């Protein structure tokens, strides 16, 4: 049991696995996804690449690469997944703001709900993306 210098029970653990904490504070949807991210090198603790079982402590800086880079500071150590308001209090998010939405969509995407592209539109999208394909012999008049 965790006890302070006076022998009283402390409210939380002294350290917790990084994959468990990332799952508990809702950075990853599943614990296995958090473990896979650690194994792939997408998680760093205080600048060092983290293994899934590495322990974090209060005050550690955790850098996570998800859809964008996130810089988190552990405020509270959690072993169980909690609701979003409690999870938000367990960390400080020092991440830069996400890029504006118009810069996130790749070039050549169609408006949502516009249906499938026609053959001509698909070829134009391929040209924009740099996937120039050889024309088929029967497509000489396009």
Image (cartoon, helix red, strand yellow):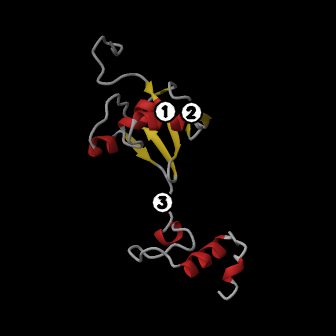
Q: Report helix, strand or loop for mark 1.
A: helix
Mark 1 Cα shell of 10 Å, populated few (<14), some (14-19), many (≥20) = many
Marks 1,3: beta carbons within 8 A: no
Total number of numbered discs in the rendering: 3
Q: Which residue sits at x=30%, y=20%?
A: 10
The quadrant in which residue 122 appears is bottom right
Q: Which residue sits at x=56%, y=78%?
A: 119
Residue 46, image x, y percentages: 57, 35
Please state, as top left, top right, bottom left or bottom right, where the N terminus lies in the image.
top left
Q: Report helix, strand or loop for mark 2.
A: helix
- The Cα–Cα distance between marks 3 and 2, rounded to whole angstroms, is 26 Å
| N-term mark: 1 or 3 | 1
Judging depth in this view, the residue of 66 and 48 nearest the camera is 66
Q: Report helix, strand or loop for mark 3.
A: loop
Mark 2 Cα shell of 10 Å, populated few (<14), some (14-19), many (≥20) = some
Residue 13, image x, y percentages: 36, 22
Q: Is residue 75 visible?
A: no
Q: Which residue sits at x=64%, y=70%?
A: 129
Q: Which residue sits at x=51%, y=72%?
A: 109
Q: Is residue 25 visible?
A: yes
The quadrant in which residue 25 appears is top left
Residue 127, image x, y percentages: 66, 75
Q: Would you name the residue on which mark 3 appears?
A: 97
Q: Is residue 33 left or right of residue 122?
A: left
Marks 1,2: beta carbons within 8 A: yes
Q: Is residue 80 left or right of residue 116?
A: left
Q: Would you name the residue on which mark 2 appears?
A: 39
Q: Would you name the residue on which mark 1 appears?
A: 35
| N-term mark: 3 or 2 | 2
């Amino acid at each position: 049991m965790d006890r302070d210098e006076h022998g009283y029970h402390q409210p939380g653990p002294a350290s917790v696995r990084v994959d468990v904490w990332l799952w508990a504070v809702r950075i990853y949807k599943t614990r296995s996804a958090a473990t896979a991210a650690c194994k792939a090198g997408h998680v760093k603790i205080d600048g060092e690449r983290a293994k899934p079982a590495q322990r974090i402590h209060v005050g550690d800086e955790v850098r996570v690469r998800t859809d964008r880079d996130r810089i988190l500071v552990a405020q509270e150590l959690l072993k169980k997944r909690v609701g979003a308001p409690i999870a938000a209090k367990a960390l400080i998010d020092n991440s830069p703001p996400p890029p504006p939405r118009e810069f996130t969509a790749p070039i050549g995407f169609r408006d949502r709900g516009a249906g499938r592209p026609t053959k001509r539109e698909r070829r134009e999208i391929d040209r924009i993306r740099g996937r120039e394909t050889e024309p088929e012999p029967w497509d000489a008049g396009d």
